[in-house]
Image (cartoon, coloured by chain):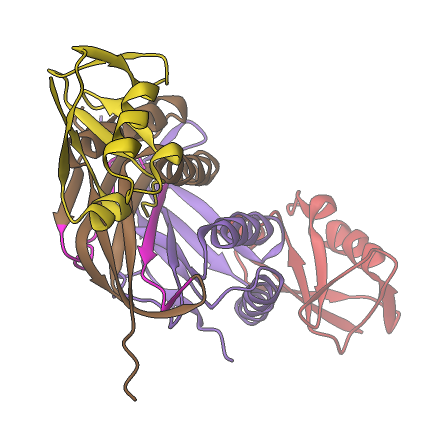
Chain colours: A red, B yellow, C brown, D purple
Amino acid sequence: MTYRVMLFGAEAAAAGERSLDLEIPEGSVTADELKLHLSEAYPGLSGVPSCRVAVNQKFVGGDEIVTSDDEIALVGPVSGG
Amino acid sequence: MTYRVMLFGAEAAAAGERSLDLEIPEGSVTADELKLHLSEAYPGLSGVPSCRVAVNQKFVGGDEIVTSDDEIALVGPVSGG
Amino acid sequence: MSIPVTIVDGPLSDAAPWSAPGAGAVLSFEGVVRPTEEGADIDALEYDAYRPMAQTMLEELAREMLELHGLEAVTVEHAVGRVAVGQTSFRLRIASQHRVEGLAAAAEFISRMKDDIPLFKIPVVREVMR
Amino acid sequence: MSIPVTIVDGPLSDAAPWSAPGAGAVLSFEGVVRPTEEGADIDALEYDAYRPMAQTMLEELAREMLELHGLEAVTVEHAVGRVAVGQTSFRLRIASQHRVEGLAAAAEFISRMKDDIPLFKIPVVREVMR
């Protein structure tokens, strides 16, 4: 299944992309598993472990389930203001 | 001696004057004594006990000496802002 | 550095844009006359001041805040005379490197001004038509 | 009541005068780009946002502050894209009956925005001519 993960700020700059596609055999994974897959597929994206995952525009805990149909975002350290 | 006492805000409104002249035989009194003389001479000025005295544009304690040459002000509850 | 502190006749006019070099946080606090004062409907507040003493104390307080909180710049404006409901009687502006010291300085400035600086307001109670 | 929350492209323009009926305290807080970022001279900050999520979270936070602190009105503006040194990236305005709740709400809003709302800045480091 293809999981599309949106990127912002430093992560978007590091990837040179606003989103990345991630191929995972399972149709659903936890948010933590998604981050592991992402780090494996894109080793240049060094900050992934300290990023949060947002699913359908809400932050989720590491144990929460993400499917390939969800709107998924990798959210690095925020710095508004 | 004539002590001229400046008034502001509610005290000026109550007195209908921006300053009052106070005749006191002594050439110097304490700030507390000045307030007593003021209450005696102008009984309509009801808020005097809760007012502060400023001498030469500085608040003074009740024991501090005031002379008729000083710039004297009776300062009621302040309410800037 | 001189700190602009102004006591002006009548309500304050709208503020022009303002900042200070190096500032990351620019705070503006305005006091506006509310339509009621101690439960009574009012038309205005009539502000009075012991002007030279208030001017000196506002300057000293602004300078103390500048140094204590490490601010970049401060300006103070206060009205005397009639200020109608909805009009501005007071404006404090603080430019600081970061927000924390600016917010702390604003709270301390206003609190100390309201305790000690010889500025006075008298409500102009609304005349009810009968 | 709808709360005006705007995410705009480029630096914020100067604020027009603003208040709310019944307010006695009108606070404006602006974030301005400082000339250095973590010790390096910069030309600008490049702001990014997860726009729909940031928009929703800013609205929810503003509404929570409005209710929790009993405010009269709140507006929020945040820039995305390039904001040069000295330009404004963020503006929070709060109208409240008294100053205490307005200052408390401003501090809480900004602190929580900086912790949680998906807005991001990347420094544009100054190119030194050699």
Q: Residue at the spot x=33%, y=23% of the render?
A: C64
Is residue D86 at all visible to an observer of this figure? no
* Residue in the image at 32% along x and 38% along y: B76
Q: What stretch is highlighted in magenta?
A: C9-37
The secondary structure that dominates the magenta segment is loop
Please state the horizontal and vertical placement of residue D28, each as a whole percent of the image.
Answer: 37, 54
Relative to C101, is A48 above or below?
below
Does residue D12 appear anywhere in the picture? yes
The foreground one among C37 and D109 is C37
**Please, is residue A39 above or below residue C101 in the view?**
below
Asked whether C97 falls inside the magenta stretch, the response is no
Q: Is residue B80 left or right of residue A33?
A: left
Q: What residue is at 43 percent from the left and 37 percent from the top? A: C98
Residue D115 horizontal side relative to residue C108, left or right: right
Would you say A79 lies left or right of A76 here?
A: left
Quarter of the picture containing the N terminus of chain A is: bottom right
Task: Judge whether D33 appears above or below A53 on screen.
Answer: above
The quarter of the picture where residue B1 lies is top left
Of residues D68 and A63, which is closer to you in this image? D68
